[in-house]
Amino acid sequence: MSKKILRTSLILIMAISVSVFAACKGNKEEEGKDKLDNQAPTLQPEDNLQDKTDNNEQAKLSVKDYYPIQADVEYIYSGEGNEFAAYNRIIDYISEDGSRVQIRTNNSGTETVRVIEVKDGKISVIKTVNECYYRDNLLNSKADGQAEILLMEPLTEGTQWTLADGRKRHISGTDVEINTPSGTYRAIEVTTEADDSIVKDYYAYGVGLVKTVFASGGSEVISELSKINKDAVYSKTIDIFYPGVDENIYVQPITITFKTGDISRLLIQEALTKEAAIKDFIPLASTKTKINSLYLGEDGIAYIDFSAELVTEMTVGSGYEELILQCITNTVGNYYGTDEVYLTVEGKPYKSGHIYLEKGETLKVDMSRVKE
């Protein structure tokens, strides 16, 4: 499902500081689309060249000035020195108060999701999920150990801190001119020193991360901001499994597009309850069926809870009912990359006139009856 990342690439991914981009869009699971009023403007490169970085002015700026947050915007970075140096970044979710964002990074080898917190004059990575090909709202997750501080106040040269893994990080410049494919910026330079590498990240006022230089063993890997796409979406292809009238299972790929703050559960619900494009496929659920909850548990099991209509509006015999449950299991398990699915109805184990599941009993992904 993903390429094996070389050690240098993994170090680069860890070293690249996360930037996010201007106007807030709330995404509470049940509110989805609320907007916040504390929108920060995204400046053009020529605006950034204004000198805002003398010592007195610099001391008045906050990390938010170098970390503007924007929904539905994609940052494209070009790269050299490594096949994974180029990447793109988009926001999945933003908390209602704007203090946390969930960012998805794709470097053509893997997708990584990070939850970033802006608090107490610091920008910190509090959770990282590598090889994350599903889209859950992780904003309320507990921190993975000690948070990694990307940038902290005061935004003056000499500010320094130590990371949990022993690396030293400090602000090494506050008015560094940086040329990138997207323009020229005056930036804060943040240097991270390890035993065998040095990383320099450059943050521009009103824009965010514009360049990263990773140096180790006489070689360099460089990532530079190339383009900013507005009104961007995250596209995900999902395999929907359907029972056929011949009692085999068939797969139909569909593409779902997500805007920042979209609730994944609702878009997947629409896909699962939609009539199949092929007439010989049996629908998985009626259009009245709702998905009450959908997520990947910390135990690696995918959890999905349906409304009562999954059972009450199912009008097939026991053989096809079993096939429908297997197809739902295959669809959800494949989406999350797990072999186990815990399926419930209104919070209780699945129960119909033909099939009874025990509390805690999971269904297993099984592709043995899937036909091309």
Image (cartoon, helix red, strand yellow):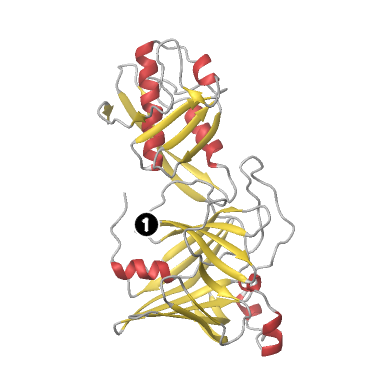
Q: Secondary structure at mark 1?
A: loop
Residue 119: x %, y % from top left? 63, 65
Q: Is residue 345 above or below residue 7?
A: above
Q: Is residue 91 above or below residue 262?
A: below
The quarter holding residue 99 reads bottom right
Residue in the image at 68% along x and 56% along y: 97
Residue in the image at 66% along x and 51% along y: 26
The image shows a total of numbered marks equal to: 1
Residue 366: x %, y % from top left? 29, 30
Residue lying farthest to the left in this orientation = 368
Type of the residue with mark 1:
Thr
> In the visual, does 219 lie left or right of 46?
left
In the picture, which quadrant includes the C terminus? top left
Asked if one can make out residue 251 in the rendered structure from this viewpoint, the answer is: yes
Residue 145: x %, y % from top left? 47, 61
Q: Is residue 304 above or below residue 297?
A: above
Towards the viewer: 299 or 216 = 299
Asked if one can make out residue 274 in the rendered structure from this viewpoint, the answer is: no
> In the visual, does 303 lie left or right of 367?
right
Towards the viewer: 275 or 238 = 238
According to the picture, the residue beneath numbered tag 1 turns out to be 110
The quarter holding residue 48 reads bottom right
Label 1 neighbour load within 10 Å: few <14, some 14-19, many 20+? some
Residue 81: x %, y % from top left? 33, 75
